[in-house]
Amino acid sequence: MMTLLLKDPEAVLNYAVDWGAEYLGADSLIASRWEISPVEQGGVNIDWASFDGSTATVTASGGISGHSYDLRNHVILASGLTDSRSITMRLEKR
């Protein structure tokens, strides 16, 4: 699943992936990691990240107007399964 969102370069915003809404059932998250691509000077930064049994949350800031970034969440489930979801951001001064 991929989501496209607009972000102002000066905005500091929370983004979340609700894994429980997808397919977890009785399974749960035991690990979550976020990464940004591309990594560039002045690009989007991950300021904070957390997760609970079904949702992974990240706070992102910065970025260069006119650029696009992928914010990807990689998770490990209690069952040992792994998966990832992406949020694509287009940076625009608003």
Image (cartoon, rainbow, N blue to C red):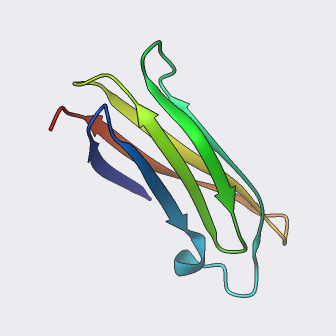
Q: In front here: 61 or 25?
A: 61
**Measuring 47% from the left and 12% from the top, which residue is drawn there?**
41
- Horizontally, residue 30 falls left or right of residue 8, namely right
Q: In front here: 10 or 21?
A: 10
Please state the horizontal and vertical placement of residue 17, each as a whole percent of the image.
52, 63
- Horizontally, residue 5 falls left or right of residue 52, namely left
Quarter of the rendering containing residue 70: top left
Task: Give above or below for 24 relative to 26.
Answer: above
Please state the horizontal and vertical placement of residue 44, each as a whole percent of the image.
45, 29
Q: Count the numbered circles shown.
A: 0
Please state the horizontal and vertical placement of residue 69, each as a whole percent of the image.
39, 33
Quarter of the rendering containing residue 53: bottom right
Task: Give above or below for 71 relative to 78.
Answer: above
**Measuring 68% from the left and 62% from the top, which residue is drawn there?**
51
Task: Give above or below for 16 relative to 38.
Answer: below
Task: Give above or below for 4 relative to 94.
Answer: below
- Horizontally, residue 17 falls left or right of residue 69, namely right
Please state the horizontal and vertical placement of residue 67, each as a whole percent of the image.
29, 25
**Measuring 30% from the left and 31% from the top, which residue is drawn there?**
9
Considering the image in quadrants, where does the C terminus appear?
top left
Query: Which residue lies most toward the top here?
Result: 41
Considering the image in quadrants, where does the N terminus appear?
bottom left
Query: Which residue lies most toward the bottom here?
Result: 26
